[in-house]
Amino acid sequence: MEMPQPTTPPGIAGLAALLENPGRGVVALDFDGTLAPIVDDPEQARAEPAAVVALSRLAPRLGAVVIVTGRPAAVAVEYGGFGGAPGLERLVVLGQYGLERWDAATGRVSAPEVPEGVGAARRALPEVLAGLGLREAVWIEDKGRAIGVHTRRAPDPQGAFDALREPLAVLAAAHGLVVEPGRYVLELRPPGMDKGQALTAFVGELDARAVLFAGDDLGDLAAFDAVERLRGEGIAGLKVCSGSQEVGELTARADLVVPGPPGVAALLTSLANALTG
């Protein structure tokens, strides 16, 4: 399988550094839309089997593999099939944009207490949706430490998304939360953590010299920012977009664009082939 090639000089350097010294390399990946296809029912999302196989081959040869997702960490582990997977004994999953951490070495999740504002917003949300005539059109995902309002199932997903942005921003602000927009989803969550901060802190734990991050959504832009900052500190970086016409901002910022989760699986397989012979 031919290795997909970055189109930018920093991306080319990042891939080269990862291949030359994998033991000091980090592969960081979003979950939905990157490892798992986007589906109408988020509870049915599952990682591409080929991606999990490739990660199982890659992980023992890398400094680290980490999943950075808005999902609760335990949910990402379950839907990814990561628990007990051979080769993934050192896998780390940073859930809720980094507020939660699951380590394969222990099988446990560590996380702070749920802020009171999340519960208050959860209780107020049905009335907000009813006032907009959208209570039956959207799907609410209770993430414990955050609340996702999905519009993909609505008759007009974009129209529902647009109608909800301002009212949900007001609701979030009233309870000390922020709104994270995504692909037909608006997530109300505590401030103070994003994928960029989570990735930066994780890389800071290691003696890393190269980092690859792959994502597909607006929340992944913060991780792209982190890769660029790490480059300024001498750590080579590669930004990969799991291609979507829905998020042009990410495509424009990427060093390499691949065709969705199957393309991510193919990239990981190519890396595994290159490092395992």
Image (cartoon, rainbow, N blue to C red):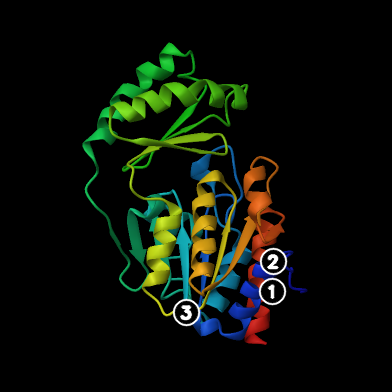
Cα separation between marks 3 and 1: 18 Å
Residue denoted by label 3: 63
Q: Residues within 10 Å of mark 3 (few under 14, many from 20)?
A: many
Question: Residue 251 in the image: x percent, y percent?
Answer: 67, 50
Q: Horizontal placement of 45 versus 261: left or right?
A: left
Looking at the picture, tell me which residue is in the foreground, 266 or 190. 190
Vertical side of 230 occupied by 220: above or below: above
Looking at the picture, tell me which residue is in the foreground, 274 or 49. 274
Which residue is drawn at the image coordinates 66% and 72% (left, top)? 269
Which residue is drawn at the image coordinates 33% and 47% (left, top)? 192
Looking at the picture, tell me which residue is in the foreground, 263 or 235. 235
Q: Residue furthest front?
A: 232
Dot 2: element: helix
Q: Horizontal placement of 157 versus 103: left or right?
A: right
Looking at the picture, tell me which residue is in the foreground, 218 or 231. 231
Vertical side of 145 occupied by 264: above or below: below
Cβ–Cβ below 8 Å for labels 3 and 1? no
Q: Amino acid at mark 2?
A: Ala
Residue denoted by label 2: 266
Q: Residue furthest bottom?
A: 277
Q: Quadrant of the C terminus?
A: bottom right
- First in residue order: circle 3 vs circle 1: 3
Which residue is drawn at the image coordinates 51% and 35% (left, top)? 185
- First in residue order: circle 3 vs circle 2: 3
Q: Which one is closest to the eye, mark 3 or mark 1?
A: 3
Cβ–Cβ below 8 Å for labels 2 and 1? yes
Q: Which one is closest to the eye, mark 3 or mark 2?
A: 3
Residue denoted by label 1: 270
